[in-house]
Structures are given as C-alpha cells and as structure tokens.
Image: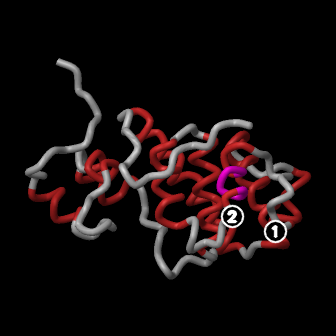
Amino acid sequence: MPHVLSPVADPIPAGAAEILKRYPQRGGYLLSLFRTFANSVRFLEKGVPNLLDAASPLSLRQREIVILRVTARNNCEYEWGVHVAAFAEEAGFTTEQVHATRLSGPDAPCWSARDRLLIQSVDELWGAGRIGDATIAAFQEAFTPEQQLEIMALCGAYHTVSFVANTARLAPEPFGARFPDAP
C-alpha cells in the first residue's frame, strides 16, 4: 500500500499534537501544511525552523520578500497564498508588488533598489545555490552577516516548505491568495 503524504486527520497523535500547540494558528485553525508536518514528530521539531518571530534580524517586509519569491519560484501556490493573505498588508506590499513576486524579475519598477537587490540575491540562491560574483559585494554591503544568514535560512526553509506542500498536493487554504494570472 502506498504511503501518501497528506495532512494528518483528527485526532492527531499525542506527541505531534503537543508540538503543534506551539505552531501558529488562525482563529484556532491549524494549516494543512502543519498537519502534513505532523506525519513526523522529528520533522515538526527539527525539519523547518520557525523563523517567523520578532527576533529576526530582517524586517517583516524583507522576510516576506524572501518567502514570497522562493515559494513563487517553486510554484508553491499554497504557501505563497498563505503568506500573501497573512502578511502582505502588514509588510506594506502593493498589489503590483505582490504580483511581481510571481510574475516579474528583480528589475520590476515597483521595487526599491534595496528590494531589487534582495530579490536578485534570492533568485541567485534559488537558481545556483549561491549569490553570484556580480551581486555578492552589494549583498554584503547591504546586509549584515546575521541578516545574510537569515536570508539563506529562509530560502532553505521555504524550499523545504514548498517541497512538502507541492508533493502533498495541498489545496490552497480557503483564505489564501491565488497566483496572479500572467499578463
């Protein structure tokens, strides 16, 4: 019999349920993604570090640019949509900027120079596993070592999140945004 990766149904096993109490919820609703993580207590504890806290060396806007770009590049509408719904307004994104995370390159005119550098850096990490020679000096000038590590950790974590959500074929959450249509 195949082992299908899918959200764990209620009742969630005790060990996983205890860990899930520490995961964010929306009005008591536990995301399908987190229920999918519950297939492994080890993964719940160690697989995806929780980088969505106030102690981040990145601003909310910077963090969300990284997450939206990585999930968009990985065609993960599920996680992209959750983050757009949960954080886009608070991060100060315009509709054009939200769409640009999916449809445009780092040179889109809606971004500031610093945002463009961040998107270019994320694209290079996503595509080549490193920041290229033409970008690295500006990246190191713009971001402290602590911020640089956080950017890389977010890229890696949201690659993993994208892999899980896409492999589990998670349907978008009812409140989640949907990918914009290409112009």
Image location of residue 176, percent across then percent down: 44, 52
Distance from the alpha carbon under mark 2 to that under mark 1:
16 Å
- Is 150 on the left or on the right of 5, as rendered? right
Q: Callout 2, which amino acid?
A: Thr
Please provide percent x and percent y for residue 22.
Answer: 27, 70
User: Percent position (x, y) of residue 169?
Assistant: 38, 33
Q: Quadrant of residue 102?
A: top right
Q: Tell which residue pokes out farthest to the bottom in this image.
A: 55
Look at the picture and state if 68 lies above or below 178.
below
- Membership of 150 in magenta stretch: no
Residue 114: give its label.
1
Task: Identify the image quadrant of residue 180.
Answer: top right
Q: In which quarter of the image is the C terminus?
A: top right
- In the picture as drawn, the residue positioned furthest to the right comes out as 134
Q: Which residue is drawn at 51% across and 41% down?
A: 76
Asked whether 8 or 98 is in front, the reply is: 98
- Residue 104: x and y, percent? 76, 45
The kind of secondary structure element at disc 1 is helix
Residue 25 badge: none
Task: Please indicate whether residue 183 sits to the left or right of residue 180 in the image.
Answer: right
Is residue 46 depicted above or below 52 in this figure?
A: above
Magenta span has 98?
A: yes
Please state the extent of the stretch shown in magenta in the rendering.
96-100
Q: Residue at x 29, y 45 (%)?
A: 36
Comparing marks 2 and 1, which lies closer to the viewer?
2
Q: What residue type is labelled 1?
A: Arg
**Residue identified by numbered label 2:** 94
Secondary structure found at label 2: loop
Horizontal side, residue 4 vs residue 159: left or right = left
Q: Residue visible at 79% across and 53% down?
A: 120
